[in-house]
Image (cartoon, grey):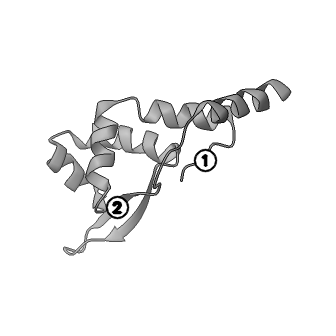
């Protein structure tokens, strides 16, 4: 389960989930890891745009990327989802706000 340590982390995750392309990327990665070119083809989106969205998702801790050598000998960066659930309720928000106020 994805836990939020602070309000900044919470906002980063929520912001990452607020774009349809990023939700489509997560959907593609839920059942199998994929590399950038594969995602671009599957989603019919340019690699540079995919990379921008992947960076935002990776920065928020929702996905991880790692480099591997592909079957054809080229280097590819694979991505995979690294969270199971994201839990948000009113208590989570209250705790985050209280932590922020105490700073």
The answer to whether 69 is drawn above or below residue 66 in the figure is below
Task: Identify the disc placed on residue 78.
Answer: 2
Query: Which residue corresponds to the image point at 64% horizontal and 36% vertical from the top-left?
Result: 92
x and y, in percent, of residue 7 in the image: 66, 32
Give the x, y percent position of residue 62.
47, 48
Answer few, some or many: residues within 10 Å of disc 1's Cα (few below 14, many 20 plus, some between 14 and 19): few
Report whether 66 appears left or right of 40. right
Q: Residues within 10 Å of mark 2 (few under 14, many from 20)?
A: many
Which of the two labelled residues, at mark 1 and mark 2, occupies the earlier sequence position? 1
Indicate the quadrant containing the C terminus: top left, top right, bottom left or bottom right. Answer: top right
In the rendered image, which residue does mark 1 sit on? 3
| Location of residue 97 (image quadrant) | top right
Above or below 50: residue 37:
below
Is 84 drawn above or below residue 71 in the view shown?
above
Residue at horizontal 42 percent and vertical 63 percent from the top: 66
Report x, y in % for residue 78. 34, 61
| Secondary-structure class at tag 1 | loop
Distance from disc 1 to disc 2, alpha carbons, whole Å, reads: 24 Å
Taking the spot 47% from the left edge, 54% from the top edge, the residue there is 83
Between 30 and 67, the one nearer to me in the picture: 30
Q: Mark 1 or mark 2: which is in front?
A: 1
For this orientation, the residue located farthest to the right is 102
Q: Are marks 1 and 2 in contact (CB under 8 Å)?
A: no
Disc 2 element: strand
In percent of width and height, residue 64 lies at 45, 56
Q: Which residue appears at 26% of the width and 71% of the height?
A: 70
Circle number at residue 98? none
Q: Nearer the viewer, residue 58 or 4?
A: 4
Image check: 74 left or right of 77?
left
Outermost residue, top side: 101
């Amino acid at each position: 389960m994805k836990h939020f340590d602070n309000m900044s982390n919470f906002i980063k995750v929520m912001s990452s989930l607020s774009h349809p392309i990023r939700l489509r990327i997560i959907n593609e990665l839920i059942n199998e890891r994929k590399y950038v070119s594969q995602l671009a083809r599957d989603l019919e989106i340019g690699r540079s745009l995919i990379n921008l969205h992947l960076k935002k998702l990776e920065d928020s801790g929702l996905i991880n990327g790692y480099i591997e050598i592909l079957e054809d000998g080229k280097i590819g960066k694979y991505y995979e989802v690294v969270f199971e659930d994201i839990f948000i309720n009113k208590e989570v928000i209250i705790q985050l706000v209280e932590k922020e106020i105490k700073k």
